[in-house]
Image (spheres, grey):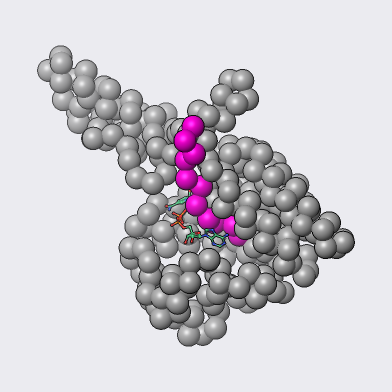
């Protein structure tokens, strides 16, 4: 059996457009997929959080985490959603952080949700989990349906059971769901992006060196890419890394390390 999904955003314009099949980002294949599932009532869009989480068993927080002035990830949007969940939830939920967030965020989400439940004198049960996203923009559907791996941090068997059920169709290709503790899952995403950014920066430095000494970086790349320990991916010299994630995530891991005395 499939899964019924409700998408929540505070941006009314975005939600109204999505209901009409207008996609706010460029992502090949997404328009057809959204229209098909919306028409079959498997997918809905709303700005009403109570409606969105009613009878749900899992809830993904996937809001932005832009860099703060000091480079740290700004968690105000993540924690604001967590607060709204705590104010509105009516049944058990596993609350899963999908946004790229620094170590300790799932615990902050847990504390905020608990605080709101306590204000309501509610003893509702809930769990938190971390499930970082590794998709590439422009290739999101393929990366989502056929992921190299799914990383999940959780300390709850009940949450694990729900997440297993959700992701089972996506790992029929044999690629694993890798379960771990919550802090390890949070740090895995930053480590992946920092490693990819490092590969690009390193090859650009070698390219500069090649220019000085009269060597060809593309030959060097082929020469090292055939080494299984290095591999052929992400070692192309270019203008440097950009995009929405690498610069902010590199800054955030440096800031988090700094805050933890490393
Ligand atoms: N874009 C990517 O390729 C990618 C890949 C991996 C991870 N991520 C991570 O995913 C997160 C989201 O990235 P994005 O590119 O989708 O950001 P985005 O800015 O495009 O979208 C975030 C959405 O959250 C909505 N929002 C803000 N506050 C809200 C609230 N309280 N309730 C409901 N909705 C709210 C905003 O209106 C916006 O539409 C970031 O942490 C990012 O690092 C992004």
Residue at position x 69%, y 45% from top? 108
Quadrant housing residue 171: bottom right
Say whether residue 159 is magenta. no
Q: Nearer the viewer, residue 27 or 252?
A: 252
- Which quadrant holds the C terminus? top right
Residue at position x 48%, y 67% from top? 11
Residue at position x 75%, y 48% from top? 111
Residue at position x 45%, y 77% from top? 16
Image height of 93 relative to 111, above or below: below
Instruction: Let me know if residue 245 appears in the view.
Output: yes
Residue 166 position within the rendered picture, expressed as x and y whole percent measured from the top left: 63, 64
Image height of 44 relative to 66, above or below: below
Q: Nearer the viewer, residue 104 or 86?
A: 86
Residue 47 position within the rendered picture, expressed as x and y whole percent measured from the top left: 56, 72
> What residue range appears in magenta?
60-70
**Is residue 232 rendered to the left or right of residue 18?**
left
Residue 14 position within the rendered picture, expressed as x and y whole percent measured from the top left: 44, 70
Quadrant housing residue 181: top right
Q: Which residue extends farthest left?
A: 214
- Which quadrant holds the N terminus? bottom right
Residue 172 position within the rendered picture, expressed as x and y whole percent measured from the top left: 55, 61
């Amino acid at each position: 059996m499939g899964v019924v999904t409700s998408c929540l955003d505070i941006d009314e314009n975005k939600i109204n457009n999505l209901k009409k099949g207008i996609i706010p980002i460029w992502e090949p294949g997404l328009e057809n997929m959204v229209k098909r599932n919306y028409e079959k009532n498997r997918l809905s869009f709303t700005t009403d959080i109570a409606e969105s989480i009613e009878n749900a068993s899992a809830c993904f927080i996937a809001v932005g985490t832009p860099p703060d002035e000091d480079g740290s990830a700004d968690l105000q949007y993540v924690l604001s959603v967590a607060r709204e969940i705590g104010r509105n939830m009516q049944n058990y939920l596993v609350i899963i952080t999908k946004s790229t967030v620094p170590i300790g965020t799932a615990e902050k989400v847990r504390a905020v949700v608990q605080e709101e439940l306590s204000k309501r004198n509610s003893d509702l049960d809930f769990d938190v989990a971390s499930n970082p996203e590794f998709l590439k923009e422009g290739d999101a559907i393929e990366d989502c349906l056929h992921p190299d791996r799914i990383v999940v941090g959780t300390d709850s068997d009940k949450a694990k059971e729900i997440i297993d059920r959700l992701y089972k169709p996506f790992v029929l290709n044999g690629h694993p769901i890798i379960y771990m503790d919550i802090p390890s899952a949070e740090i895995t995403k930053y480590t992946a992006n920092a490693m990819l950014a490092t590969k690009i920066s390193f090859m650009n430095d070698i390219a500069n060196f090649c220019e000085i000494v009269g060597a060809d970086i593309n030959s060097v790349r082929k020469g090292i890419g055939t080494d299984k320990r290095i591999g052929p991916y992400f070692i192309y010299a270019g203008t440097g890394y950009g995009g929405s994630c690498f610069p902010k995530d590199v800054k955030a891991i440096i800031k988090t390390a700094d805050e933890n005395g490393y």
